[in-house]
Image: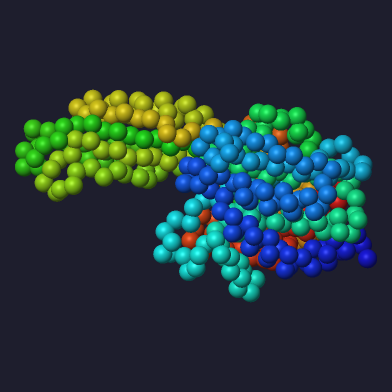
């Protein structure tokens, strides 16, 4: 039997072990302090035990100091198996942390007690990002169980804090141990994609969240001249901000949607009663900006709009960027990681992969800022962060096979 066929068969045989590992991981909630938890320690400890069973040539922790977390740090883990031929490495990065289950009444059962229904497993974290953790683990195990040597060094990186900014996760690792990663390494982040497993994400838009505060003067609704209506100001500004779509209207076919987006989203409560004219309103704009534009250009345009309108309506308008992530330079469409992963997807599923850009916010951006080409991909169910989050066992197995194919491509 051909080597790959043997590895695929081995991976198929892991179904019940995959379910068991998913159950154990789900039972160890890994919530960061911003999400009301104490960190990812329990989950990291369990994974470390499991990794030790695979006898890695290297296994170490990277503790990112965080006073708010248990023991004063956030756990990150690196395990690697040496390669027999090439010097470069293949890295697969998954994240340990989850988001909170949210409104429990929307769950059909305890989110931390995983359920299995046919091919589907349900529980908080099973897809985002335990799917990546488990598929990469069993890809490695499939090779090792068959005593199949890795042509190229293979490393698994398990990080904390992906859901709340990566300051104590990948950003910290890259600050402390940038030497781990080389420009010609293949870096895969199985934390995004589509249901067919054909989407390789190589580029992101910049993200900008703006908070607008409109200050007028509160008064009784029957005497509007005595006050200054901040809600009218907010509404007018929202309409004016729509011109951003015309002024920054470039289209880039890598992305879906292909243009930059500027959407008003959240509005804070103002006055409690109908017969009061509000004197203060706060709303937010979510901007996803194509790499073709600089974030500063947008901010400049918004500032000009604000000043003009503030003068016209005699209101005070303040704007603050509450979140900003300038997009990293995209991974090239012909980068080795994109080509090799595309071939592996085709070999396992028969489908043709396509490279794409997304609205922003994946952890891969931190690799790309460092000039390390990373690809985000997974055969993923669209349930991340939702109640009754689910994941397909078949997809975990398929992804493990694709990863093993990548390991053997060197
Ligand atoms: Zn994720």
Q: Is residue 323 visible?
A: yes
The percent position of residue 47, horizontal first and vertical second, equals 70, 51
Q: Which residue is at the front of the view, 133 or 31?
A: 31
Q: Residue furthest left?
A: 222
Tell me what residue is drawn at x 40 percent, y 28 percent.
301
Q: Is residue 363 visible?
A: no
Q: Which residue is at the front of the view, 332 or 34?
A: 34
Q: Residue furthest front?
A: 71
Coloured how? rainbow
Residue 71 as seen in the image, left or right of residue 338: left
Tell me what residue is drawn at x 35 percent, y 25 percent.
304
Tell me what residue is drawn at x 89 percent, y 59 percent.
146
Residue 149 as seen in the image, left or right of residue 381: right
On the rendered image, what quadrant is the N terminus found in? bottom right
Q: How many numbered circles are shown? A: 0
The percent position of residue 52, horizontal first and vertical second, equals 78, 50
Q: Residue furthest bottom?
A: 118
Q: Which residue is at the front of the view, 145 or 185?
A: 145
Q: Vertical placement of 12 versus 328: above or below?
A: below
Tell me what residue is drawn at x 42 percent, y 34 percent.
322
Residue 334 found in image quarter: top right
The percent position of residue 107, horizontal first and vertical second, equals 47, 65
Q: Vertical placement of 302 versus 50: above or below?
A: above
Residue 224 found in image quarter: top left
The percent position of residue 351, horizontal first and vertical second, equals 73, 60
Q: Vertical placement of 214 versus 83: above or below?
A: above
């Amino acid at each position: 039997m051909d080597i790959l066929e043997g590895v695929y068969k081995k991976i198929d045989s892991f179904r019940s072990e995959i379910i068991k590992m998913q159950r154990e991981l789900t039972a160890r909630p890994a919530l960061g302090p911003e999400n009301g938890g104490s960190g990812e320690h329990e989950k990291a400890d369990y994974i470390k035990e499991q990794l030790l069973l695979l006898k890695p040539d290297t296994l170490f922790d990277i503790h990112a100091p965080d006073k708010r977390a248990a023991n004063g740090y956030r756990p990150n883990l690196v395990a690697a198996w040496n390669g027999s031929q090439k010097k470069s490495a293949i890295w697969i990065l998954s994240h340990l942390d989850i988001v909170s289950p949210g409104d429990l009444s929307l769950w059909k059962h305890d989110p931390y007690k995983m359920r299995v229904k046919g091919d589907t497993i349900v529980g908080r974290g099973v897809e985002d990002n335990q799917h990546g953790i488990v598929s990469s683990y069993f890809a490695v195990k499939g090779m090792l169980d068959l005593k199949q040597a890795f042509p190229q060094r293979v490393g698994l990186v398990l990080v904390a804090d992906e859901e709340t900014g990566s300051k104590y996760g990948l950003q910290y690792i890259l600050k402390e141990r940038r030497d781990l990663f080389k420009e010609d390494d293949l870096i895969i982040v199985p934390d995004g994609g589509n249901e067919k497993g054909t989407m390789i994400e190589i580029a992101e838009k910049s993200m900008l969240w703006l908070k607008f505060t409109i200050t007028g003067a509160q008064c009784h609704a029957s005497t509007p001249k005595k006050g200054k209506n901040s809600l009218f100001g907010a509404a007018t500004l929202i309409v004016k901000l729509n011109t951003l779509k015309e002024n920054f209207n470039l289209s880039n076919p890598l992305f879906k949607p292909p243009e930059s987006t500027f959407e008003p989203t959240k509005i804070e409560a103002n006055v409690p009663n109908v017969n009061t004219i509000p004197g203060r309103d706060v709303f937010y704009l979510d901007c996803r900006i194509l790499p073709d534009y600089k974030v500063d250009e947008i901010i400049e345009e918004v500032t000009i709009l604000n000043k003009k309108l503030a003068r016209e309506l005699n209101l005070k308008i303040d704007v603050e960027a509450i979140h900003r992530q300038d997009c990293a330079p995209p991974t090239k469409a012909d980068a080795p990681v994109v080509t090799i992963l595309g071939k592996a997807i085709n070999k396992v599923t028969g489908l043709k992969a396509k490279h794409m850009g997304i609205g922003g916010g994946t952890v891969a951006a931190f690799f790309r800022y460092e000039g390390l080409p990373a690809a985000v991909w997974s055969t993923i169910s669209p349930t991340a962060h939702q109640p009754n989050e689910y994941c397909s066992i078949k997809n975990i197995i398929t992804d493990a096979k694709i990863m093993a194919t990548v390991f053997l491509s060197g």
